Image (cartoon, grey):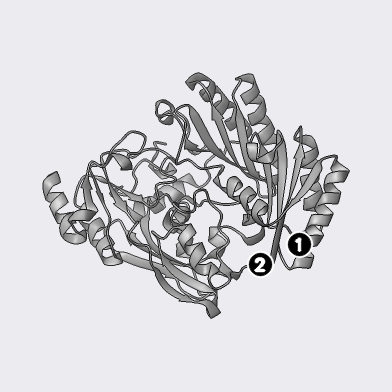
Amino acid sequence: MNLALLRADLTAISGEQYVREHPVDRHIYGQTPLLAVAPGSLEELAQTVARLAAEPVAIVPWGGGTQQTWGRPPARPFVVVETSRLNRILDYTPDDLTISVEAGMTLGALSAALAANGQMLPFDCPLPAQATIGGLLATAMDGPRRLGYGSARDLLIGIRVVEATGRISKAGGMVVKNVSGFDMMKLYLGSFGTLAIIASANFKLIPQPRAAASILCRAATPAPLWKLINAIAASQLVPVAVEYLEGFDVAGAPCAVAVRSEGLPAAVERHVRDVTAFAQQAGVSAEPLRDAAHEQLWNAINDAPQTATLAADEVVVRVTCLPADLSNAIAAARAAAQRANLPLQVTARALNGVAYLRVRGSAEALREWHAALLKAAPQTMLLAAPPALIAELPAFGTHIANLDLMRRIKQEFDPADLLNPGRFVVGQVA
């Protein structure tokens, strides 16, 4: 491969200032890309991918870089294709409650634009000022409010992508009910950029709530908090988030549950009153939070699973299981951490069956803790780990459903294995 010629060709497409050679700020687990290129339009993105497809290099999409540790590092030398310049609103009519944005727009910028019209896209994610829409879709990142509003798959109504050959394709549209036959856009959710590079996305929106409040319930041990969680689940309350916390300073206690309510003022006040009563029955304290304190709590919870800044001895995982099994999975992680004398932090969507766990320690202790967790929660996904461990720890757990089907889809969409090779489960050796 002639790197100088490749750089010249990419420069002709996007401009000299948007092509960098060996950029150390785009490394993935210590691997530095050959080049980084930032196309400025859909057409430039398509031309860039088409040009790279002719070379024996991997293509790594890069949004805000907040989740590049997820999965495994690239399997061979790679070029980073950045979406940071694809950050525009393409179509927005507030009366229709729909919006189309380019994939490089950050969630923070999108939220600010929508707030001007009293609307919102109820996504939560770590580091929203950096995290891009394309990256959130590609990794299927979820947030605490998925309980009340659903996840990305429930809010996405259309998508445009650039395939491995450089071809532009789309699915869905700008109306809420527009799909007949196969809903192709859902294929790209959680595909880690291995099927195509997301260029833009369309969403349905909702009005901002008239009122919001939180109830922060604290306890010295987990048991009474899970009793509270079960009471909320069995009630007629409809909180938008019920988050279990363990080991985080934000909680002000060893364990806590944060309940978030949004909607009409009377409904919010009912949640404050009833959750407080449930907490008293469970034997835990309850503190209502509003305004700035409410926002600060959820900003901290949203940032808790972040993997953009990591300690050298830190492992971060995402556990998914049935909601009824979540407390047992967290208990197994806690017991394994105590045996190895590892500090454990947990933030969990208590009624969704999703938890993010962080531990720090020696390589051997981390290895043993991860193995013990996999026995209790086989669908544990590795989000970050020390470079010495990343190659040996199972990145996507030990129970992978529909693996053969996913590999066949990858073969159909990217037969040359150009896009993020080795990163996702379909690129691993069987």
Q: Quadrant of residue 185?
A: bottom left
Q: Amino acid at mark 1?
A: Val
Residue drawn at point x = 63 percent, y = 32 percent: 376
In the rendering, which numbered label is found on residue 204? none
What residue is shown with label 1? 268
The one nearer the camera, 410 or 143, is: 143
The one nearer the camera, 269 or 351, is: 269
**Placement of 20 over or under 94, stated as above or below:** above
Report the side of 74 relative to 228 (left or right): left
Which of marks 2 and 1 precedes in the sequence?
2
User: Which part of the image, by quadrant, shows the N terminus?
Assistant: top left
In the rendering, which numbered label is found on residue 209? 2
Dot 2 lies on which element? loop
Real-space Cα distance between discs 1 and 2?
Answer: 10 Å
Q: Where in the figure is residue 145, as x and y percent of width and height?
A: 63, 55
The one nearer the camera, 370 or 284, is: 284
Could you tell me if residue 324 is visible in this image?
no
User: Which part of the image, by quadrant, shows the C terminus?
Assistant: top left
Q: Where in the figure is residue 271, as x and y percent of width and height?
A: 79, 58
Q: Where in the figure is residue 126, as x and y percent of width and height?
A: 52, 48
Residue drawn at point x = 50 percent, y = 30 percent: 314
Q: Quadrant of residue 201?
A: bottom left
Q: Amino acid at mark 2?
A: Pro
